[in-house]
Amino acid sequence: MKGSWRLYLTLRVFPGIIIQAFFGLMPDIDKKTERGKAKMNEFECIRQETCSSQEPEMIYDVAIIGAGPGGIFSALELTQQAPELKIAVLEKGSALKGRRCPIDGEKIKSCIGCRSCSIMNGFGGAGAFSDGKYNITNEFGGTLYKYVGEEKAIELMEYVDEINCRMGGAPARLYANDDPVIYRKCLQNDLHLLKASVRHLGTDLNYVVLENLYAALKDRVDFFFNTGAESVSFEDGLYTVTADTGKVFRARRCILSTGRSGSKWMESVCRTLEIPTQSSRIDIGVRVEVPYETFSEMTDALYESKIVYRSKKYQDRIRTFCMNPHGVVVNENTNGIVTVNGHSYEDPALYTNNTNFALLVSNHFTEPFHESNQYGESIARLSNMLGGGVIVQRFGDLIRGQRSTQDRIESGFVKPTLQATPGDLSLVIPKRQLDDIIEMIYALDKVCPSTASDDTLLYGVEVKFYNMEVEVDSSLETCRKGLYVIGDCSGVTHSLSHASASGVHVAREILKQLEEEN
């Protein structure tokens, strides 16, 4: 092919000084013909595309790592109050519509270990496919009130609730956990019902709210999906975030909001930047599935019942968590480990005949042990090794010391909503925690008869990983000025409402600082 060589060279001389160009053979073209004009346009497009990166490096006002509830609400508050700010949001997972778990129950029946779990990662975070419970309380869900004050913490959670309602969550009922009859009945059996207001969006309505939140943000911030942060450093007065795609982001302020699944990464960042932390806890337990009628008196009145029990044998604290009337039990993948969780829907057409909830034993470790999350992972890995994923067992089989079989599961009166491997949880869960769980099931049986039925199903293992508590001030700012930690990765929050509220709080603190600087 005849033509003349055109040389455009790309060189990085020093950081920030770039010479870019295009190198290729430019053929001799008759520019008067239509084909010639098209060819010239094609080469011009290539040249412009190659040289476009000569533009000055983008420096963001705020970089947010993680598009879970904390990251979403911090971005929303910043853009609403200061739309001129340049904001980048990096998210390890996909955009909301791209989040699809390959498990279909037919061709793929168990977790295949995707590079990024669509249940845990992506816009909306791990809560995107949860049952969307927003608990407005300081009694559980985190310790945000210790940093901002009890009254302000409630105000922030109520503000989040208002936004969720505006974004499509208004049809969801707001429940109040203050039924005196149920409260007294629990207390008479050494069960302590925690009080809260609960907005239950359901998995379906929660998705609608997230769709509308994304629509409100997509033209105001720069989203970078399937872009996990590898490292965070501080140089020349700017935070540098290096992504696993190779892309580098620079920002004046940085908000870390990577959730519980980012706990290991968060530990490495704190070590690198020498940010003080405190040891965390780990919750280990099972997901209990019973007929809907077993807990209907409680769930019809309260919907979400947070009940705490102190075991007689060990004086350990056991609690119910994530109660889902008419719900389904689901798999969850955290750091490549398959655990169990539960969902429920607001749409009656999606109801099941069962109710599920977790029973979790809180474990706090002292010196010299600091690897609480690794402890939980080792137990979950044992379940994966024995059962190829989640194990299910009838309560009656557990009490008799026998492994559940497929025949016994199928002949039971409680039909499982998750395909799991029948097995023996006593080979997986440590004796102390298992004794605690059994003791609380018998205590619940006094309030909700038939909880301790032989056919009650126990799925294991359910593990709640907590980040070590990062040392932050009342603005949730670390010792590194301009670096904030919010949501569950901070160790401060453990719920959708607290995580979202922490995002709003940090956004307002940043806006206040910007106003003072100007």
Image (cartoon, rainbow, N blue to C red):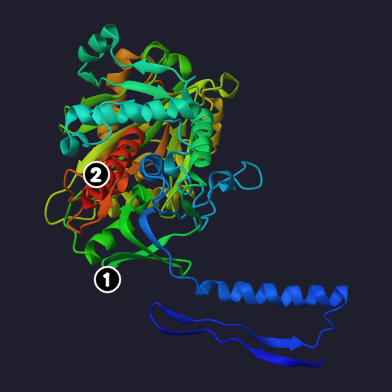
User: Rounded to the nearest whole Å, what is the CA distance between mark 2 and mark 1?
Assistant: 23 Å
Circle 1 — which element? loop
* Viewer-side residue, 272 vs 331: 272
Q: Which image quarter is the N terminus in?
A: bottom right
Q: Is residue 392 above or below residue 295?
A: below
Nearest to viewer (mark 2 / mark 1): 2
| Mark 2 or 1, nearer chain start | 1
Q: Is residue 55 above or below residue 341?
A: below
Quadrant of the rendered image containing residue 138: top left
Give the residue displayed 25% in from the left and 36% down from the top: 142
Residue furthest to the right:
33
Quadrant of the rendered image containing residue 496: top left
Quadrant of the rendered image containing residue 336: bottom left
Circle 2 — which element? helix
**Percent coordinates x, y for residue 281 in the rendering:** 22, 45
Question: To which residue does mark 2 refer?
Answer: 512
**Percent coordinates x, y for residue 117 in the rendering:** 49, 51
Q: Relative to residue 56, is residue 369 drawn left or right? A: left
The amino acid type found where label 1 is placed reads Asp
Question: To which residue does mark 1 refer?
Answer: 236
The amino acid type found where label 2 is placed reads Lys
Give the residue displayed 28% in from the left and 41% down from the top: 508
| Label 2 packing within 10 angstroms: few (<14), some (14-19), many (20+) | few
